[in-house]
Amino acid sequence: MRVLFVHGAFVRDGAWWWQPTADVLAPHGLRSSAAVLPSCESEPRGDLYADAEAVRALLDASAEPALLVGHSYGGMVITEVGDHPAVRRLVYVTSFLPDTGETLAGFGTGEPAPWHVSHGDGTAGVREELVRPLFAQDFDDTTYAGAADRLTAQNEAVFGQPATRAAWREIPSTYVVCGEDRATPPETQRAQAARATDVVELAVAHHPFVTRPDLLADVLLGAVDR
């Protein structure tokens, strides 16, 4: 079994974000990799469907069964591509879990989140002064410096693009509710989690794969056992 990680919005270098959890999984014989999302790292920026195709290409590269893990915005991506024959289970981490036709923007109140800033060129980003208090309150200074260096602009189109597939209707899924997340309220997560096959709630903030890789790795190992 391999694990394929898909990161959230407004960041680059997915391998950096997921490495602490990858390091915990490796002694258990689980090979892992992190997707590079064109909406965050290509020029010009790709869209939601380009992100899904990038993940599909990684899945196509091997017939080995895969656990597909999406964080936050990454839940949109794994829902779009998770019906790939290699995928055995989807794992949503404080994530959006859309049905067909639903968009990322549709999960909110209709107003941009306070941390969302449009750049006027078709891209958007996150207000850095809100990153640590909302998304990374549990990061130490060194880790936060690394995270801040990996913030990036993302194609704003992804927020209005609908899911064309709902892989969770066919593929078993686990939702990880992050109970101390200040960016995506736990009650919002629990509403999303109602669609998943299994739900696990952890007392962690928005990025448990960085700050509590031991806890998230336990969930992923359990998902593999299923």
Image (tube, rainbow, N blue to C red):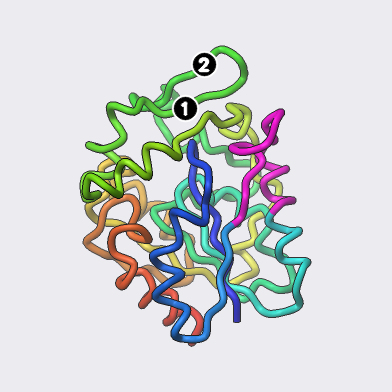
Q: Is residue 89 visible?
A: no
Residue 140 left/right relative to 22: left
Spatial CA span between label 1 and label 2? 7 Å
Relative depth, front residue between 123 and 99: 123
Q: Residue 63: say if magenta.
A: no
Q: Which mark is residue 169?
A: none
Q: Which residues are magenta?
A: 35-54
Label 1 vs 2, first from the N-terminus: 2
* Residue annotated with mark 1: 125
**How packed is label 2: few (under 14 Cα within 10 Å), some, or many (20 or more)?**
few
- Residue pictured at 39% horizontal, 53% vertical: 94
Q: Position of residue 66 (x, y in %)?
A: 63, 74
Relative to 151, residue 165 above or below: below
Residue 87 left/right relative to 9: right
Q: Which amino acid type is marked by label 2? A: His
Q: Which amino acid type is marked by label 1? A: Gly
For the residues bearing labels 1 and 2, Cβ distance under 8 angstroms: yes
Q: Is residue 22 visible?
A: yes
